Image (tube, coloured by chain):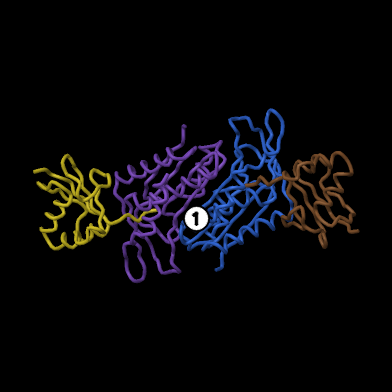
Chain colours: A blue, B purple, C yellow, D brown
Amino acid sequence: MGAVLDVRVQAAPFDPGAEANAFAAAVQGAGALVTFTGLVRDEGGQLTGMEIEHYPGMTERAIAAIAGQARDRWRLAGVLVIHRFGPLAPGAAIMMVATAAPHRADAFAAAEFLMDYLKSRAPFWKKESGAAGAAWVEAKAADEAALDRWRRG
Amino acid sequence: MGAVLDVRVQAAPFDPGAEANAFAAAVQGAGALVTFTGLVRDEGGQLTGMEIEHYPGMTERAIAAIAGQARDRWRLAGVLVIHRFGPLAPGAAIMMVATAAPHRADAFAAAEFLMDYLKSRAPFWKKESGAAGAAWVEAKAADEAALDRWRRG
Amino acid sequence: MTTLDVLYFAWVRERIGLPRERVTTAAPTVAALVDELSAREPRYAAAFADRRALRVALDQDLADFDAPLAGVREVAFFPPMTGG
Amino acid sequence: MTTLDVLYFAWVRERIGLPRERVTTAAPTVAALVDELSAREPRYAAAFADRRALRVALDQDLADFDAPLAGVREVAFFPPMTGG
């Protein structure tokens, strides 16, 4: 099916609501739209900023492969992935995924799948800055474990 | 926890992207935001419009109860539910839910739970109009079955 | 005898031809009320023909057909919901 | 002997002190290349000390440490990803 596939890796800020509306208009006809937006937490004011490093070239390639898998696995009208790199302020949108489908179960499952794979298989690394200095965010075992549920199908 | 709880049942159109951004700002501090938007499908031009009937009073009560259950069950920073009634044009947003949480698994699960319950337990009825006339949308066995997965926990 | 507000929605409303009415009844349960209404006129009988296709709410909470009507002020009949 | 672009990201880059370099090597596998680099200087040994904490990509695809380097032009070392 002629699903919309839009992947962007960028330093520039983006407006999640405006992107969701533009995506909904682009896939018009689909009844169900799911979005996930990841925001920089302020950790009760402890976090002063975040920096995201990525691997140019591989990033786009990895995200496109993950999005393609989602499109093969569920009945989707479209997939949107936007992921920022560089410095980000507390409250800023780090990334978003949006999925559109005729039925909500497909849109939800594909969005969760995309998030689980992006978190652990796309080459991004987060470094958080606070009063105590800057530190690389460690990968969580739960994120790696989250991939298991998609291996059964 | 002082979670944002915002439920609106209205005839007026709404802007899903603008609502998602306003909700994100209201719950600032949460790292994960999930939205679901239900749109009127055009069924390849076959559908000329939709009318939604509801049960004033019970609607708000049922949605508030469902949202309260979600808030008790997952760690959430906020829940937003907007559902329209009255006439709707193809492509229009029928309803949306948004959930905000520290972690994405909670935000996704709560959004799916809200959708499953809203679909089958909130008193709304859809009537679709097309070239062949108007007809009430029939409830799907799959929607009733979707509730089962939430009964285990 | 008690007087109830009885509400109809969606195709139940269309078949019966009105959105709400006041009904004075001695019916002890929802099922007894449905029997009483169905005996009135064919349009009621048509609306209530298949009870498995109907849902009922008592004072705006979903209930079963065998629920008692004691103390209830508002009864609503409608098809399975299709929101979302 | 072959010449590779070797890239480092996140704390691997910080420990080694540079983002990329050209390496001429006869190492047949990723593991052999890691051994060779680790023998160079303490900063490499520090970066590669715990291989379970490292990931490797060959020509921008994730690979294992026992993968062969034949035909590969770009090797990247980095910690587990933390995007999303």
Q: Which residue is mark 1?
A: A33
Residue D45 on image: x %, y % = 83, 41
- Residue D63 in the figure: left or right of residue C42: right
Residue C52 on image: x %, y % = 25, 58
- The residue sitting at 56% across, 50% down in the picture is A18
- The residue sitting at 86% across, 47% down in the picture is D37
Quadrant (top left/top right/bottom left/bottom right) for the C terminus of chain A: bottom right
Q: Please state the chain letter of the residue tagged with numbered disc 1 in the rendered image.
A: A
- Quick check: B66 above or below A77? above
- The residue sitting at 34% across, 54% down in the picture is B86
- Quick check: A78 above or below D77? below
So how many labels did they put on this image? 1
Q: Nearer the viewer, residue A125 or D75?
A: D75
Residue A7 on image: x %, y % = 64, 57
- Quick check: D6 above or below A30? above
Residue D18 on image: x %, y % = 83, 44
- The residue sitting at 58% across, 30% down in the picture is A44
What's under tag 1, amino acid-wise? Leu
Considering every residue shown, the one lying at the far top of the view is: A131
Considering every residue shown, the one lying at the far bottom of the view is: B132
- Residue A6 in the figure: left or right of residue B5: right
- Residue C41 in the figure: left or right of residue D81: left
Quadrant (top left/top right/bottom left/bottom right) for the N terminus of chain A: bottom right
- Number of residues whose C-alpha sits closer than 10 Å to that of mark 1, classed few (under 14), some (14–19) or many (20 or more): many
- Residue C26 in the figure: left or right of residue B131: left
User: Element type at marker 1?
Assistant: strand
